[in-house]
Amino acid sequence: MDTRKPDPNPSDVSPEDGMPAVTGEGQLAAIVAERDQLAAEKLDLHDRLLRAHAEFDNARRRFERERSEYLQFASMDLVKQILPVLDDFERALQVETNDQNYSKGVGLIYQRLFENLKKMGLEPMDTAGRQFDPNLHQAVERVHTDKVDDQAILGEFQRGYHFKGKLLRPAMVKVAVKP
């Protein structure tokens, strides 16, 4: 047999029994406070979710941009290492030889190599008739002369190149200087 007393109805409890009386208004106020707290938590969670989405989108865009730049300039080091070979072919083409087939063969190999490097993004710099620019040229020799403008490029010792718009190697040039 159960000797426990049933729980009294909260509205029946009086302050004399040691328990505060809970009224309908008190319950309503507690529910409204809980609702307001849950609404504030919901707004906070929604804001955090939006921020997390924005951070994820920014990270994804940054990763894609870095990946694109990496792929775009991944071949830059390889092309830079091949430039001395290209220079050697240019010097070989300037040498006089009696064997025309040999000269023609070297010319064809040079042309094929140069065209493939151009497809990859190599762009030769044109220095003829230009003014010296320390951002694009390296002055190897300075010649005092009154015949041309000051800082005019008189000759090119080694061709300079851009790779996809960026300077790969400055041109080594001879520059005129007014005395």
Image (cartoon, grey):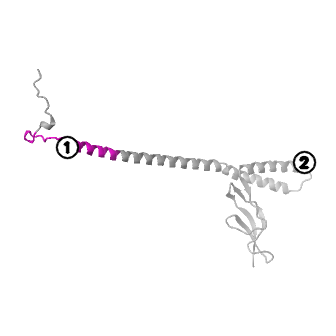
Disc 1 versus disc 2: nearer the observer? 1
**Does 28 lie within the magenta span?**
yes
Place residue 154 in its image quadrant: bottom right
Residue under the point 67% across and 65% down: 135
Secondary element under disc 1, as helix, strand or loop, is helix
Residue 12, above or below 120: above
Most foreground residue, 175 or 148: 148
Q: Mark number for residue 68?
A: none
Mark 1: few/some/many CA within 10 Å (<14, 14-19, 20+): few
Most foreground residue, 119 or 39: 39
Most foreground residue, 160 or 8: 8
Horizontal side of 2 relative to 172 (left or right) equals left
- Residue 44 at x, y percent in the picture: 37, 47
- Residue 48 at x, y percent in the picture: 40, 47
State which region is magenta. 14-41
Residue 88, above or below 171: above
The three-letter code of the residue at mark 2 reads Asn
The three-letter code of the residue at mark 1 reads Glu
Residue on which disc 2 sits:
101
Mark 2: few/some/many CA within 10 Å (<14, 14-19, 20+): few
**First in sequence: mark 1 vs mark 2:** 1
Residue on which disc 1 sits:
25
Residues at marks 1 and 2, CA–CA distance in whole angstroms = 107 Å
Residue under the point 51% across and 49% down: 58
- Residue 3 at x, y percent in the picture: 10, 24
Residue under the point 76% across and 64% down: 127
- Residue 97 at x, y percent in the picture: 90, 54
Secondary element under disc 2, as helix, strand or loop, is helix
Residue 7, above or below 91: above
Furthest residue to the left? Answer: 16
Residue under the point 81% across and 76% down: 147
